[in-house]
Image (tube, rainbow, N blue to C red):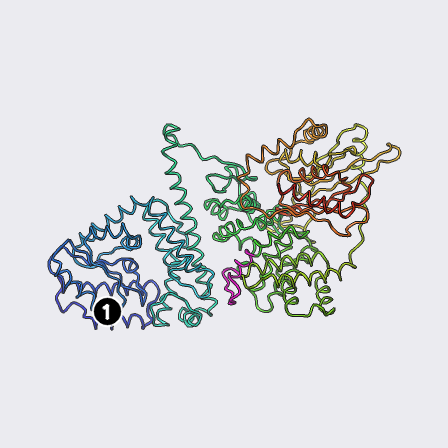
Amino acid sequence: MRSQAEKPDPGGYAAARLRLLTAGAQSGPPRRAALAALTDEWLAGLFDRAAKGRGVALVAVGGYGRGELSPRSDLDLLLLHDNGDAEEIAILADRLWYPVWDLGLTLDHSVRTPAEARRAAGEDLRVQLGLLDARHLAGDRGLTAALRTTVLADWRNQAPKRLPELQDLCAERARRYGELQYLLEPDLKEARGGLRDATVLRAVAASWLADPPRAGLADARRRLLDVRDALHLTTGRATDRLALEDQDQVAAALGLLDADALLRQVYEAARVLSYAGDLTWRDVRRVLKARAARPRLRALLGGGKPPAERSPLAEGVVEQDGEVGLALTARPERDPVLLLRAAAAAAQAGLPLSPHAVRHLAATARPLPTPWPAEAREQFVTLLGSGRPAVQIWTALEAEGLITRLLPDWERVRCRPQRNAVHRWTVDRHLIETAVHASALTRRVDRPDLLLVAALLHDIGKGWPGDHCVTGGTIARDVALRIGFDQADAAVLADLVRHHLLLVKTATRRDLDDPATVRAVAEAVGTRGTLELLHALTEADALATGPAAWSSWRGFLVSELVRRVSAVLTGDAPEEPGPAAPTAEQERLAVEAFRTGGPALALHARPEPPAGEHPGTDAEGSSQEPEPLGVELLIAVPDQPGVLPAVAGVLAVHRLTVRTAGLRALELPDEVGDGSVLLLDWRVAAEYGSPPPADRLRADLARALDGSLDIATRLAERDAAHRWRRGAGAPPPRVTVAPAASRHATVIEVRAQDAPGLLFRIGRALEKAGARVRSMHVSTLGANAVDAFYVTTDTGEPLPEPDATSMARMLEEALRA
């Protein structure tokens, strides 16, 4: 035992502590470790002077047990004894606790036997977590070692029961304190993604039930501890709340530019911890579920463990064990679109991406060429249009740095705070939330793809100096061209971003009865299509901002402004163009169909027109031909009832997705005969694999037309088998009658979630209503189908207004069923 002269007295400890915290020579982990070591030595000296005999130990638990002391941290101490003399234990405790209190330090203390400590851990999960970090300070080392061994064994044995309890505690804490990565005045310890969650992840790892991801965890925890150290020193208080009035001082103490840089660093650390927690608790649930099922499986299968079923979702993408991963044959290094295809498939199915798959893609995926191929853009739009499931997929991609690889401009808005009480989220999360809300509004617009991309980019300029609307418009145009939109679409996206605040600002700050107000908005917007998109974007932006940003009154004002601006723009609408002359091949197929009395068709792989004015380039900068967006399917069929549902049904049976579709009647040349043939010019793509040969499609189409192929039953059986894959509910379909869209026909517009058999259901419903489809124009944009059907009566006249309204209502009900 050391002599009395060698023991530091309380005054000596206080002076040494003050020097350590104010000298500035050390900071971060070295200072925390040095403070813990200094405190260890002082407490050990107090113990050695006061303790008599064996059977007593002083133990550090919790944060102090981990050897990490912030300037104003509590001292968590346990006086452990083996049922010795109660009076002597009480005297020893007083001689330890009072010097701590005398120095003004916060003390969390207990006095227990090993059995009492073990019982307290069994009754209180917080006590058990603290004991997992128990560290011997002084006295009977064997007593401490035995307690550590017992507590750790109990924790591992009881993990299946206690971990769900721990997860519930974490969820309740998150509800009380919020998410650290989005709060303007966060609690660094208790908020979700804070220091308490870092401790929880250590506890889960100690259970051996699941292994939290390690990448970035230590660094994220260190950053939060550094911020808390600076907060303690600048405020002089034992606080974990990073208040607004303290942020500039804390930032300066850490050598950061300003409070925004401080919050951004905090948010980045919290994001790492939150994502690690999500993955860890997912693993825990999976392990516990597997353990619960194992006895039943063993009884059924005689001890064998069946391999997890792999179900295909898209080309190179499978579902296995509740997660979306890569097929065994997938080659990310050869397939640059695989990343977005997997992300879109996962979001559409409402399933998480496998962390292993995301890491593998991050390490091996080939960069996308510039501009992106058509499929990449389609998959990107599908991901954005998937609603709420898109958030967890985006988070997974961002955790591995894949978002900034796809969109380099994203780096400037990532984790960027918004110092506005109206905003709930950081800039990047607000953009994702806007896309989520926009996905519910896609039925209101003709170009949902432009709406979704505008939602994602509308605040992209906030990462740059100046007016974020003006700067964002320029960035949005560049991004649009890079991801494969043409010049016209890029210009629309730039306008949407530049004017995304125009409607709400004008509606709430200007006189709508002043004609100049409406004219100014009309001149800025330019077209009804842009106005329609801007209206939906305005609502999605406000809903994603927070409850205070949108109300029924604001919605009414904006809608009224849109109505008046639309009336101004209506006079500029171009007249309806006439039908294009048929090509030689179309005419040849029409003649063949007329002469044979059956369908004639041809399949062609046709490249999509290049986006923008420049050819694509690959990662090495060499020129690259544009990739085909599916194949072109030309069909000619003698004019007869049921053509539309027959063709759409055959394609659905063969798992062919309709990208675009057109249908029109083609008059035959006089020398061929008297009559007309229906001509269908469609662009289709296989869900995975290759399309079937043309002769097989022709044969099945002939069977569908003569009634020998029961398409409805085939589709119903397949839909029932795979209904579980649909994930989160899509917004309901919307069917409207376009006013004054055509002088020759009634235009029925359908906006719905794209799905196998959608066109078949629409066509069958129109046939049942007795409508004659004069022409149709179908486009699939991401996960959204935007279809226009020009229908007439049997005599070729537009439908009377009541009949048209009734037909639209009937079709909408049929699609909702």
Q: Residue furthest front?
A: 802
Residue visible at 11% across and 60% down in the picture: 52
Q: Residue furthest right?
A: 671
Q: Residue furthest top?
A: 708
- Residue 173 vertical placement versus 786 (above, below): below
**Residue 694 placement: quadrant:** top right
For this view, does 49 lie left or right of residue 357?
left
**In the image, what residue type sits under mark 1?**
Trp
Give x and y (percent) for residue 729.
Answer: 56, 46
Give x and y (percent) for residue 529.
Answer: 71, 56
Magenta highlight: main SS: loop
Residue 493 located within the stretch drawn in magenta: no
Give x and y (percent) for residue 513.
Answer: 72, 68
Residue visible at 30% across and 61% down in the picture: 68
For this view, does 396 lie left or right of residue 603?
left
**Residue 56 placement: quadrant:** bottom left
For this view, does 809 lie left or right of residue 571?
left
Residue receiving disc 1: 101
Residue toward you, 234 or 157: 157
Residue toward you, 495 or 648: 648
Q: How many marks?
A: 1
**Residue 700 placement: quadrant:** top right
Residue toward you, 699 or 190: 190
- Residue 67 vertical placement versus 784 (above, below): below
Quadrant in which the C terminus appears: top right
- Residue 505 vertical placement versus 738 (above, below): below
| Residues rendered magenta in the picture | 413-433
Residue 429 located within the stretch drawn in magenta: yes
Quadrant in which the N terminus appears: bottom left
Secondary element under disc 1, as helix, strand or loop, is helix
Give x and y (percent) for residue 234.
Answer: 37, 72
